[in-house]
Image: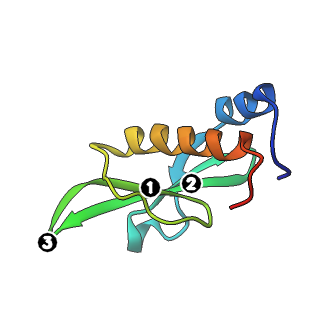
Amino acid sequence: MPRPLSAAQVQAVIDAAVLEKAPDHRDTRRWHVVSNSQLLAVIEPAYRGLTRHGWRWKLAGGTWAARPEANREKAAVVALGAWQRWATSSEEK
């Protein structure tokens, strides 16, 4: 997807985004944030020791967020916000 996108284009992608189980969900418990068949972010359980400690996210092809979120829906919203900043930015990363 070319960058930077206009605000209207970004909003259309975000409005069409859905949270769905990843193909390997059975083994990894990962979820994907997908819009128009494009993977935007990955959400997975965050663990502290042997106990799940929230959900962490990463943009497709990026690094995992440092701070876990309380639930996967909140992690998806935070990830979409980060994707919005990335998609409207003109600087290369």
* Amino acid type for the residue under numbered disc 1: Trp
Q: In the rendered structure, which disc, 2 or 3, sits on the residue that comes first in sequence?
A: 2
- Residue occupied by mark 3: 49
Alpha carbon separation for disc pair 1 and 3: 18 Å
- Residue occupied by mark 1: 57
Give the left or right position of residue 75, taking residue 3 as reference. Answer: left
Give the left or right position of residue 5, taking residue 56 as reference. Answer: right
Q: In the rendered structure, which disc, 1 or 2, sits on the residue that comes first in sequence?
A: 2
Give residue 54's position: percent from left, percent from top. Answer: 26, 52
Residue at screen point 51% across, 45% down? 79
Find out whether the residues at labels 1 and 2 contact each other: C-beta distance under 8 Å: yes
Alpha carbon separation for disc pair 1 and 2: 7 Å
Q: Nearer the viewer, residue 18 or 74?
A: 74
Quarter containing the C terminus? bottom right
Badge 1 crowding class, 10 Å Cα cut-off, few under 14, some 14 to 19, many 20 or more, is: many
Count of residue discs: 3
Find out whether the residues at labels 2 and 3 contact each other: C-beta distance under 8 Å: no
